[in-house]
Image (spheres, grey):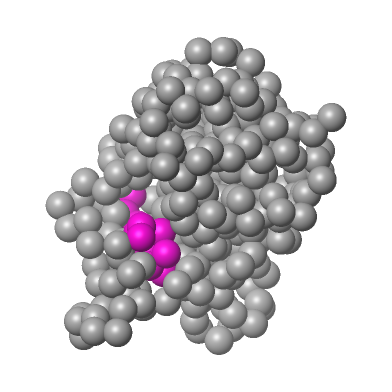
């Protein structure tokens, strides 16, 4: 029997990518809503309740409204918005973090897919706190670069327009007031005592991102070197198909550059450890539309269904 799936918000970037990935699957029956009724609450309610699994690819408020429409508990909701990532009763959809996270996804009815920047940040910081290497009260900062595809239809249209302003040809730092919407989950999921400083940059390419966290080696416990930290990450994620840890002689690290779009189109995440014995930088490279959005959503669905975790994904 096929699993009935409804994508609420199928016209957005994440919804379109999820829909694309289902086209070659014979175990999924997609439920479609008429374009003129896609904002009609009653029609959406009907589609959600008719589904086994509903993906929410919507702005936050609309995602909350759709979740409330799913009165039938048997409907599994996988929400790609920010709305429920730190809410009680919602599993955080990052199964690689721990057995507890994986079991929560496997057995959950309400799954919140991590934010793209949060995915990179948490993949780096959570293991260090879990291993008591990074103190919870460490004043963590992070910087990141991303393609423009995750910023929504209007921004994509601006970048791809014929008469765009010259500023779009350069990287642009934003979230200047330190109020980025991913900060809440970055703090809560990692267990940090204080909200990290976060400086993201949007740049002139379509997809892919790098999130980095600089660390002072002598403030870690014990004092770490890049080599030992690399070994720690490799052991922590050794059973995880979606996360790779780069060797110190990796060609990208050796070149001196980690490209923001280097893993565009791939659904995994790669961790680098660079720096020296005094100052270390840990970095996560991945596709903001893959492990940072639609790929992670489908990975969670696959775990729930008990099929190959990477089914329909590119690894």
* Image: 313 above or below 30: below
Report the label total. Answer: 0
* Image: 90 above or below 297: above
Is 67 in front, or is 94? 67
Q: Position of residue 104 (x, y in %)?
A: 62, 25
Residue 40 covered by magenta stretch? no
Name which residue lies at 36% across and 77% down: 160
Q: Can you see residue 234? A: no
127 left or right of 121 in image = right
Q: Position of residue 275 (x, y in %)?
A: 47, 71
Is 203 in front, or is 271? 203
**Range of the magenta residues?**
137-153
User: Image quadrant for the C terminus?
Assistant: bottom right
Name which residue lies at 74% across and 40% down: 28
Which residue is outermost to the top? 72
Quadrant of the rendered image containing residue 290: bottom right
Residue 144 covered by magenta stretch? yes
């Amino acid at each position: 029997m096929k699993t009935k799936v409804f994508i609420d918000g199928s016209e957005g970037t994440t919804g379109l990518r999820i829909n694309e990935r289902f086209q070659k699957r014979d175990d999924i029956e997609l439920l479609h809503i008429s374009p003129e009724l896609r904002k009609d609450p009653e029609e959406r309610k009907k589609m959600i309740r008719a589904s086994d699994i509903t993906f929410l690819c919507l702005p936050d408020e609309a995602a909350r409204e759709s979740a409330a429409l799913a009165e039938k508990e048997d409907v599994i909701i996988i929400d790609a918005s920010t709305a429920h990532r730190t809410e009680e009763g919602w599993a955080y959809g990052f199964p690689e973090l721990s057995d507890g996270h994986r079991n929560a996804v496997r057995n959950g009815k309400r799954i919140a897919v991590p934010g793209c920047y949060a995915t990179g940040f948490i993949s780096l910081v959570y293991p260090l706190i879990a291993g008591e290497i990074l103190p919870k009260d460490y004043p963590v900062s992070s910087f990141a670069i991303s393609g423009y595809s995750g910023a929504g239809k209007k921004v994509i249209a601006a970048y791809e327009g014929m008469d765009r302003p010259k500023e779009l040809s350069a990287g642009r730092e934003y979230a200047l007031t330190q109020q980025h919407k991913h900060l809440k989950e970055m703090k809560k999921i990692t267990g940090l005592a204080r909200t990290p400083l976060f400086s993201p940059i949007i740049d002139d390419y379509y997809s892919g991102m790098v999130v980095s966290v600089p660390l002072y080696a002598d403030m870690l416990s014990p004092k770490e070197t890049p080599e030992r930290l690399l070994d720690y990450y490799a052991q922590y994620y050794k059973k995880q198909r979606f996360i790779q840890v780069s060797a110190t002689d990796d060609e990208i690290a050796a070149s001196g550059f980690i490209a923001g779009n280097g893993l565009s189109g791939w659904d995994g995440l790669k961790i680098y450890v660079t720096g020296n014995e005094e100052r270390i930088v840990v970095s996560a490279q991945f596709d903001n539309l893959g492990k940072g959005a639609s790929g992670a959503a489908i990975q969670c669905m696959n775990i729930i269904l008990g099929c190959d975790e990477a089914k329909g994904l590119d690894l």
